[in-house]
Amino acid sequence: MKMIEKGIDMKAIGFDLDDTLYDRLTIYEETYRDMQATDHHLDVDFETFNQVYAEFSEQEYQAFMAGKKTEAAFKNDRVIETYAHFGHEIDQATAKEFNQLKNHYQEQLSLSEDLVALMEAALSKGMTLFVLTNGTTEAQIDKLANLGVDQLIDRDKWYISESMGGSKPQRKVFDAIAADLNVAPQEILFVGDDYQNDIEGAIKAGWQAIHYSKIEVPNTVATCTTDDFLEMRTLLGNL
């Protein structure tokens, strides 16, 4: 495992949102469990369902970012397409029901104690905290608010792809944030779970990056890999 590069005084620490600040998998698992108790039961386990759902979700998100679909359409269509993939046709009302269940579980989100401790320690050292997330502005703001992130990170440091006009791993997104923070790229550390979007994107922009994962990618470009926020404090040394 690599360590945070010595001799560099980190000025800013950023975090991805989905599957980094909270566990998105749990929310979808609970949503799927509830849907399985309705007339829309599928003969597939959650892992199989979620893999297909994630693929359609990415396709629909890209269509939304390209201006080809509204937010409501892309969120409903990814559900409809997933169920259709498994041979079960659902309508817009059922897709909306799925999303309402998901939103219900999202409203119960909270940050882990170790993550809060990491953020508070960084703030006490004068570091700037920020969030960089792909997604729609309204939805991501709602998640961050439910998590109570505004108690630790100012809202003007919530960088959301829809509002920025670009998505991770595009270099322009990372460069725009470094410029807005007025911090040198090598003095920014980013924490995220998605290897391509978060880690490769950050590293190519000259940032340092912690891959939030249990498993280290072979020949990883990440500064280090861990899914333990307490360990991150140790790796950062001065926190």
Image: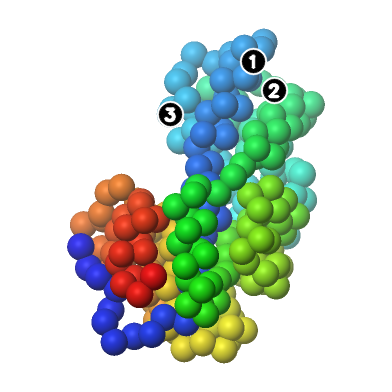
Amino acid bearing label 3: Glu
- Quarter location, residue 180: bottom right
Residue that carries the numbered disc 1 in the rendered image = 40
Sooner in the amino-acid sequence: mark 1 or mark 3: 1
Residue at 61% x, 42% y is 109
Residue at 35% x, 62% y is 232
Q: Report how far apart the C-alphas of labels 1 and 3 lie in the structure.
A: 17 Å
Is 27 on the left-hand or right-hand side of 99? left
Residue in front for this viewpoint, 170 or 142: 142
Amino acid bearing label 2: Ile
Residue that carries the numbered disc 2 in the rendered image = 90
Q: How is the image coloured?
A: rainbow
Sooner in the amino-acid sequence: mark 3 or mark 2: 3
Residue at 55% x, 76% y is 128
Label 3: element kind: helix
Discs 2, 1 touching: Cβ within 8 Å: yes
Image quarter in which the N terminus is found: bottom left
Discs 1, 3 touching: Cβ within 8 Å: no
Circle 2 crowding by C-alpha within 10 Å: few under 14, some 14–19, many from 20: some
Amino acid bearing label 1: His
Residue that carries the numbered disc 3 in the rendered image = 47
Q: Report how far apart the C-alphas of labels 2 and 1 lie in the structure.
A: 8 Å
Q: Is residue 91 above or below residue 58?
A: above
Q: Is residue 219 above or below residue 60?
A: below
Discs 3, 2 touching: Cβ within 8 Å: no
Circle 3 crowding by C-alpha within 10 Å: few under 14, some 14–19, many from 20: few
- Quarter location, residue 189: bottom left
The location of residue 186, given as percent across then percent down, is 39, 84
Q: Nearer the viewer, mark 2 or mark 1?
A: 1
